[in-house]
Image (cartoon, rainbow, N blue to C red):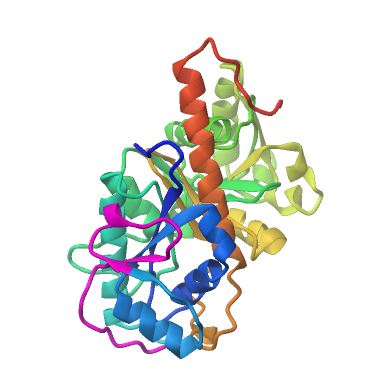
Amino acid sequence: MRKENSKIKVGISIGDLNGIGCEVILKTFEDPRMMELCTPVIFASTKTISQQKNDLGMEITFHGLDSASHALEGKINVVNVWKEVPTVNYGMATEEAGMYAIRSLKAAVSALKNNEIDLLVTAPINKKNIQAKDFNFPGHTDYLAKELDGDSLMFMVTESLKVGLLTDHVAVKDVASAITPKLIMTKVGIIEKSLIADFGIRKPKIALLGINPHSGDNGVIGKEDEEVLKPAIKEMSLAGKLIYGPYAADSFFGSDTYRQFDAILAAYHDQGLIPFKTLSFGQGVNYTAGLSKVRTSPDHGTAYEIAGKGVADAGSFKEAVFTGIKIFKNREEYEGLTSNPLKKQKVRPA
């Protein structure tokens, strides 16, 4: 448990060393005001951070240590996960960069599980070069689902737009067969609980997007919406959940219908992420809802094309830090309030 009045420890995995991860991390914390909000703990090595800051021409100081439990407030802390100096080839997807990205992630997750840090913010990785004998996951979300308690859900969030995914890193050809009534109800349950506990929304309204074009046009364009989505929505509605749909995805966002809901559940990756990133790129945050610990990430990838040039925008990474802190505080408050039902709940009205 975090000591009372101590600053929240934000653990940070370094991501792909050949991408913009280290740059956006350092740009975020070169602003000394960030130290008033949290204590950053970067999992990499002081040699690696020194190399990257020199390559980027940045003036920033940091404190090296062997364990996150020894992190100092008011400092940028760097846990030495490795002693050697990895080869950095900006803009290239190399096996070596993937290996160090995973070493950083595993060390950060271990510290998170041991309560040495309070939450985790992950810099971008390359889903191909991270694959190894001891790491066979499509990305962060799947790995965290294995390591932490709970059922995970990829939840892309801003203050005004929140999009979850029924299926995330699943090939389009497999989407329809992967969506079952049980999956729908599980994911809706995760979103509903997250909106209440993590975002302070009393009675969340959730929209479900159709699987097929025009939500199947009453069975003319595929039967999944009629046979799977609609019965599940009806059952959840009868149980008191404010779940609506299925909505045709092509007009849902352009017509501003999304503004009527606290969250949207998309059937598959691009159906949800294309409109989300179009509407909020640079301000969006990737949050893994449903787990026992808080993990956020920026809404962009490694951006190899600009890596090492010093031009990366740290806006989304900074938002990931802010959002992680806000969610962590909301959870603390929610747990305190629900553990004592005599206290009045402080959440905004639906």
Q: Residue at x 29, y 88 (%)?
A: 87
- Examine the residues drawn in magenta and state their main secondary structure: loop
Is 261 on the left or on the right of 187, as rendered? right
Position above or below: 167 against 89: above
Which span is picked out in magenta?
64-91
Task: Find out whether residue 110 is within the magenta segment.
Answer: no
Q: Nearer the viewer, residue 256 or 122?
A: 122
Q: Is residue 134 left or right of residue 169?
A: left
Q: Is residue 89 magenta-colored?
A: yes
Give the quadrant of the C terminus: top right
Res 54 → quadrant: bottom left
Instruction: Please state the horizontal and vertical placement of residue 103, each as a whole percent of the image.
Output: 25, 67
Question: What residue is rendered at 24% in x and 62% in y?
Answer: 135
Q: Which residue: 58% across, 78% down?
A: 312
> Which residue is rendered at x = 67% and y = 35% of the image?
245
**Occupied quadrant, residue 80:** bottom left
